[in-house]
C-alpha cells in the first residue's frame, strides 16, 4: 500500500489535528521525500526503513518520528468520535494492558484517564517535543542532544499505545470504513522501523505481538 494512497485515504476523513511538515531545502525534507519515494515504489517495507547510505541516523529517526506522528493522528482522527468516555473509560488494550498518563507537569503521578483524553494529552506532548528545537533542531548547524534517541524511543513507545487501542477496541470502526489494509500497512512500517533500530521494547510491543507475527509471515498485510 503506497504512502500516498494511505494519506489520500485518511485525509478524506476527519483529521485529529494539523499535520507537522518539514521545511523545504532541509536535509530532513530530503530524507522525508526519500522515505516517501521508497514506500511509493512498492519496495519491501523491511528494506525501506534501513538507514540510507551516508545519512545520519538521528536525522532518519527524526523524519520517521514526525511521519508516524502525522499518520497515527490521521488514523485516530477516523475513529475518535467512537472513542468516548462511555465506550473507552480507560486507555487500554484489552483487559491485560492499561496505560496511565504522567507528564511530570500537570500529571506528576501516573493517572487513569479516558482513552480520548489520554490520546489528546499524548499528541500535545509529542507535538511539544517535535517543536522543541533543543530536541529536534531544525537546521544542520544545531546538534542533536545526547538524549535524542532515548527521547524518540519514549515518543514512539507512547505512539504505539494508540495503535494498541485502535486495533483492540476500534478495529471494527476501521473495517467499517474499509481502512484495515491502510492501517495494517502503517503498523507494518512502524513495526519494521522501531525493531530495525531497537527503539521500542518488546514489553511495549507485546499487546500486538500476534499482529506482528502475522505481518512477518504474510507480506500482504
Image (cartoon, rainbow, N blue to C red):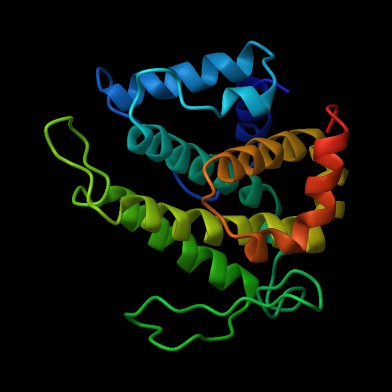
Q: Is residue 18 left or right of residue 211?
A: left
> Which residue is rendered at x = 57% and y = 80% of the image?
100
Count of picture labels: 0
Specify the quadrant that holds the C terminus.
top right
Front in this rendered view, residue 215 or 33: 215
Q: Is residue 186 left or right of residue 170?
A: left
> Which residue is rendered at x = 62% and y = 76% of the image?
99
Relative to 66, say whether 16 is above or below: below
Front in this rendered view, residue 59 or 108: 59
Relative to 107, say whether 189 is above or below: above
Q: Is residue 95 left or right of residue 198?
A: right
Specify the quadrant that holds the N terminus.
top right
> Which residue is rendered at x = 29% and y = 22% of the image?
27
Residue 40 is situated, as x and y percent measured from the top left of the image, at 62, 15
Residue 128 is situated, as x and y percent measured from the top left of the image, at 32, 57
Relative to 69, say whether 112 is above or below: below
Quadrant of residue 62 within the rendered picture? top left
> Which residue is rendered at x = 46% and y = 68% of the image?
121
Residue 168 seen in render: yes
Relative to 33, say whether 213 is above or below: below
Residue 198 is situated, as x and y percent measured from the top left of the image, at 54, 48
Q: Residue furthest top?
A: 41
Amino acid at each position: 500500500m503506497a504512502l500516498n494512497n494511505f494519506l489520500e485515504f485518511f485525509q478524506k476523513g476527519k483529521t485529529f489535528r494539523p499535520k507537522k511538515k518539514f521545511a523545504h531545502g532541509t536535509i530532513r525534507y530530503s530524507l522525508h521525500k526519500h522515505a516517501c519515494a521508497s514506500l511509493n515504489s512498492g519496495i519491501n517495507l523491511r528494506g525501506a526503513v534501513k538507514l540510507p547510505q551516508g545519512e545520519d541516523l538521528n536525522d532518519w529517526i527524526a523524519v520517521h518520528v514526525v511521519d508516524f506522528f502525522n499518520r497515527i493522528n490521521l488514523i485516530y482522527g477516523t475513529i475518535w468520535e467512537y472513542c468516548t468516555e462511555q465506550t473507552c473509560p480507560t486507555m487500554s488494550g484489552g483487559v491485560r494492558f492499561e496505560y496511565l498518563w504522567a507528564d511530570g507537569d500537570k500529571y506528576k503521578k501516573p493517572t487513569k484517564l479516558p482513552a480520548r483524553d489520554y490520546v489528546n494529552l499524548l499528541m500535545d506532548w509529542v507535538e511539544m517535543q517535535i517543536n522543541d528545537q533543543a530536541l529536534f533542531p531544525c537546521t544542520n548547524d544545531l546538534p542533536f542532544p545526547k538524549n535524542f534517541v532515548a527521547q524518540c524511543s519514549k515518543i514512539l513507545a507512547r505512539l504505539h499505545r494508540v495503535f494498541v487501542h485502535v486495533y483492540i477496541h476500534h478495529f471494527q470502526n476501521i473495517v467499517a470504513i474499509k481502512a484495515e489494509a491502510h492501517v495494517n500497512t502503517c503498523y507494518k512500517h512502524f513495526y519494521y522501523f522501531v525493531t530495525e533500530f531497537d527503539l521500542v521494547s518488546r514489553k511495549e510491543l507485546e499487546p500486538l505481538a500476534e499482529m506482528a507475527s502475522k505481518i512477518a509471515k504474510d507480506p500482504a498485510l
